[in-house]
Amino acid sequence: MEESNVSHSLFHTTLVPAILESGIKDIVISTDAVAIVNCWNMSEDPQSAVMDVMKKRITDDRVFISPIGGNRDATPFADINGTAFKKVEEVAMKVMLEVIPVPFLLMTGTDSRNSNVLSRGVIKCIAILDLKREYAIVEHLTLEDMNRMIFFYSQLIRHSGK
């Protein structure tokens, strides 16, 4: 799985230069530049550790490295033996026969992090199969994935109390 760019990021903290700014004209050499780097941290890599690695690897004193607003550590893993994961796994296997539910693999940030103070059973999942379209430059869902998501979440809600 690690051979593809999409799946490689599932197993490693990933750093991606998102915005590069420098200069005002193509014939003028700029004296300063700004790079904004997105860091997608794995749960075991807190933001402070990622910052430390960047500072150790970029040894130029002219480079200033600092986090910008809105940064936060990755959310903790949910208990794969807990009730919440087992219920999502059960419904997923009924709705998406070709999928094996795998813990820890969500490639995006979610608002679920706000619920982690309430429960260790917060499960982050998306019921889509076409990841190439979801994580592309122009993100969109197929109609098939949208219908699958609606059905999946409706089944999950119906079976949550059982």
Image (cartoon, rainbow, N blue to C red):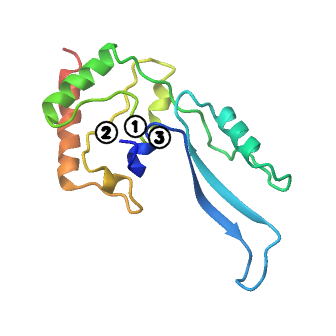
Label drawn at residue 106: 1
As drawn, the residue found furthest toward the right would be 61
Residue 89 x %, y %? 24, 24
Label drawn at residue 109: 3
Which residue shows up at 72% across the image and 37% down it? 52
Q: Using the image, determine if residue 33 lies above or below residue 83.
A: below
Residue tagged 2 = 126
The three-letter amino acid code for the residue at tag 1 is Leu
Residue 158 x %, y %? 18, 25
Which residue shows up at 47% across the image and 18% down it? 118
Which residue shows up at 50% across the image and 24% down it? 76
What is the C-alpha distance between the residues marked 1 and 2? 8 Å
Disc 1 or 2, which lies upstream in sequence? Answer: 1
Left or right of 56 in this view: 162: left
- Which quadrant would the N terminus be assigned to in this image? top left
The three-letter amino acid code for the residue at tag 3 is Gly
Left or right of 115 in this view: 26: right
